[in-house]
Structures are given as C-alpha cells and as structure tokens.
C-alpha cells in the first residue's frame, strides 16, 4: 500500500468522508505533515476499495449529484494499526532554500538577506495559523490532549511537530538574514 493510502485510512479511521472531504482534510487537518492533490485521492480510494480496505455508500442529495461516502473496513483498520508501528522509510531531504544557503556565499548579501527574510515571514505566517489551531484544540479538546489513546491526542501530536518545524525554520531564516546583513 502507498503512504497516501495510509494517510487516507488515518483520516477515515476518525470519520466517514467523501472524496471531496478527504481532499479538504489533506489541506486542513494533516496539511502540516502530509498533502495530496484531488487527482491523487480518487485513484487511491479506488485502489483501497478494490483491495478491501475501504467501502463506500451512496448518499442522495437534493440539488446536487449523489456522493460517495467512504468508510474504513476492519481490514483497513488492521492494516493501519500494523503500519503505524513499522519503522518509517527514510525519505530524501530536498529543500531548495537550504540548497541556496549552501551557495549563499556567492550571492549579493542584501539580495540573499531579502530572500531569507521573506522565507522567515512565510514560516512565521504558517506558525501563526498553527498556533491558532493549537489554541482551538486546547479549548475544545482539553481533556483528550493528554490521553495517548485518543485520536485527538494524535492530531495534537502531529500539530506540535508542525509548530516546532515552522518555529525553527523561521528562526533559521532570520539568523541567516541577520548574518548576511552583518556582512555589508
């Protein structure tokens, strides 16, 4: 099974969703650590259904076409449970901004500082969005955030990773921009 398949099963283990809703969740709930395009989700759903990991039912709608709502099966839940504790495959690190930093000594310091200040600003903006989500989680899910057996705890754990990533990346960009501005 693909990693995208497991991402979909992880979402469906929490609630039944249409393909459209799955794609939205990829951007919202798991967007800080996993993403998939609309064009990737539907073929993966078809594969998961063909292999017995999910099933769907048709929901009739007024003034809209009927929609398929997907649900994880017992087989899908078992596969997800097994996969969660398997070692993660090493992934190649590919970060264009870090690659640029590797050769930054060749750049005009002012231009390079501007590039890294802009990147810091983007990461700070994302950090602010994550902090808003964290505040909401702490208000709405307070009791569940300390219970590792809760899906809400798991959602919070992934959000904390996103918070740390954005915080550190923004700090690194600011540090580099400060260093470049000190060269003048």
Image: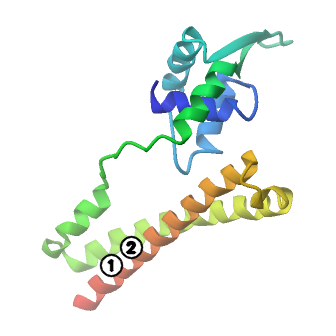
Q: Please provide percent x and percent y for residue 17.
A: 72, 26
Label 2 – label 1 distance at C-alpha: 5 Å
Q: Residues within 10 Å of mark 1 (few under 14, many from 20)?
A: some
Which mark is drawn over residue 173? Answer: 2
Q: Please provide percent x and percent y for residue 176.
A: 32, 78
Residue 184 visible: no
> Quick check: 18 left or right of 97?
right
For image coordinates 63% across by 60% down, the residue present is 130
> How is the rendered protein coloured?
rainbow
Dots 2, 1 in contact, CB < 8 A: yes
Which mark is drawn over residue 62? Answer: none
Q: Please provide percent x and percent y for residue 77.
A: 65, 27
Q: Quarter of the image holding residue 175?
A: bottom left
> Quick check: 179 left or right of 68?
left
For image coordinates 84% across by 13% down, the residue present is 61
Q: Please provide percent x and percent y for residue 55.
A: 68, 13
Classify 34 as above or below 96.
above
Report helix, strand or loop for mark 1: helix
Q: Which residue in the rendered view is the most extreme toward the left?
A: 106
Residue 18 visible: yes
For image coordinates 54% across by 31% down, the residue present is 6
> Quick check: 119 left or right of 26?
left
Who is closer to the viewer here, 43 or 7?
7
Classify 62 as above or below 110.
above
Q: Quarter of the image holding residue 41?
A: top right
Report helix, strand or loop for mark 2: helix
The residue that disc 1 covers is 176
Q: Quadrant of the C terminus?
A: bottom left
Q: Quarter of the image holding residue 131?
A: bottom right
Q: Residues within 10 Å of mark 2 (few under 14, many from 20)?
A: many
Who is closer to the viewer here, 169 or 52?
52
């Amino acid at each position: 099974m693909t990693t995208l398949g497991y991402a979909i099963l992880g979402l469906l283990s929490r609630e039944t969703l249409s393909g459209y809703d799955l794609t939205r969740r990829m951007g919202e709930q798991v967007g800080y650590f996993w993403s998939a395009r609309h064009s990737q989700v539907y073929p993966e759903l078809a594969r998961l259904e063909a292999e017995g990991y999910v099933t769907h039912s048709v929901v009739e709608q007024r003034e809209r076409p009927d929609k398929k709502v997907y649900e994880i099966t017992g087989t899908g839940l078992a596969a997800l449970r097994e996969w969660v504790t398997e070692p993660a495959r090493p992934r190649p690190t590919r970060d264009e901004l870090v690659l640029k930093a590797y050769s930054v000594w060749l750049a005009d310091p002012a231009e390079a500082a501007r590039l890294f200040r802009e990147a810091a600003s983007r990461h700070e903006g994302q950090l602010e969005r994550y902090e808003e989500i964290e505040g909401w989680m702490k208000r709405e899910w307070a009791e569940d955030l300390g219970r590792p057996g809760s899906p809400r705890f798991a959602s919070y754990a992934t959000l904390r990773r996103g918070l740390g990533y954005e915080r550190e990346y923004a700090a690194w960009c600011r540090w580099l921009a400060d260093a470049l501005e000190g060269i003048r």
